């Protein structure tokens, strides 16, 4: 990851935080994309997901272990992803392949969902992502403290 790209993403995210206090889906996707490696054809998934984060209705981050995560971009809009309480991912054995496997949104009503095909898989630099998220939280705290401080 180039330092300039990270700085640009952080600047964009900070400007968003100043007005809303949190990042919207597009800004979260930009932050995760800034810490994603090149596209790969597949990823290993042993025993299930360790966690996941929706990044709008066309992308999500999935953790296969606490220190290993992937950015999955989908072929199109994935109905219900942005507010789902649970997901599943198809695989062949323990291998999830782009273009063949799908994200399955678990609908709490029990209605069937259309599978969402995975278009790209990119490994995330989890350490750098966590560091950037920490920098954003620190900047938000400093902005709140500055706004709450009495004028002199």
Image: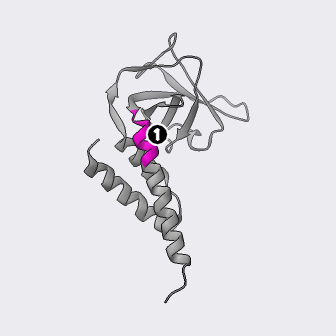
Residue 114 at x, y percent in the picture:
57, 29
Residue located farthest toward the front when viewing the structure as drawn: 152
Q: How is the image coloured?
A: one colour
- Mostly what secondary structure, the magenta segment? helix
Residue 9 is a magenta residue: no
Residue 20 at x, y percent in the picture:
52, 65
Which quadrant is the N terminus positioned in? top left
Residue 25 to residue 79: above or below: below
Image side of residue 3 versus residue 12, left or right: left
Report the residue at 59% width, 40% height from top.
80
Report the residue at 47% width, 50% height from top.
133
Residue located farthest toward the right when viewing the structure as drawn: 109
Residue stretch in magenta: 124-131
Asked whether the viewer can see residue 26, the reply is no
Residue 61 at x, y percent in the picture:
49, 36
Residue 148 to residue 105: above or below: below
According to the picture, the residue beneath numbered tag 1 turns out to be 58
Residue 74 to residue 90: above or below: below
Image side of residue 104 versus residue 27, left or right: right
Residue 129 is a magenta residue: yes
Residue 144 to residue 38: above or below: below
Asked whether the viewer can see residue 22, the reply is yes
Report the residue at 35% width, 53% height from top.
9
């Amino acid at each position: 990851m180039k330092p300039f790209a990270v700085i640009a993403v952080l600047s964009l995210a900070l400007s968003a935080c100043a007005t809303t206090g949190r990042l919207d889906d597009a800004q979260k996707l930009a932050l995760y994309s800034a810490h994603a490696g090149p596209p790969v054809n597949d990823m290993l998934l042993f025993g299930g997901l360790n966690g996941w984060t929706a990044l709008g209705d066309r992308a999500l981050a999935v953790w296969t272990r606490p220190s290993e995560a992937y950015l999955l971009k989908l072929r199109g809009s994935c109905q219900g992803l942005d507010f789902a309480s649970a997901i599943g991912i198809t695989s062949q054995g323990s291998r999830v392949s782009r273009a063949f496997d799908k994200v399955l949104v678990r609908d709490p009503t029990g209605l069937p969902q259309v599978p969402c095909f995975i278009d790209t898989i990119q490994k995330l630099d989890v350490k750098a992502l966590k560091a950037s998220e920490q920098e954003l939280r620190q900047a938000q705290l400093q902005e709140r403290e500055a706004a709450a401080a009495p004028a002199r």
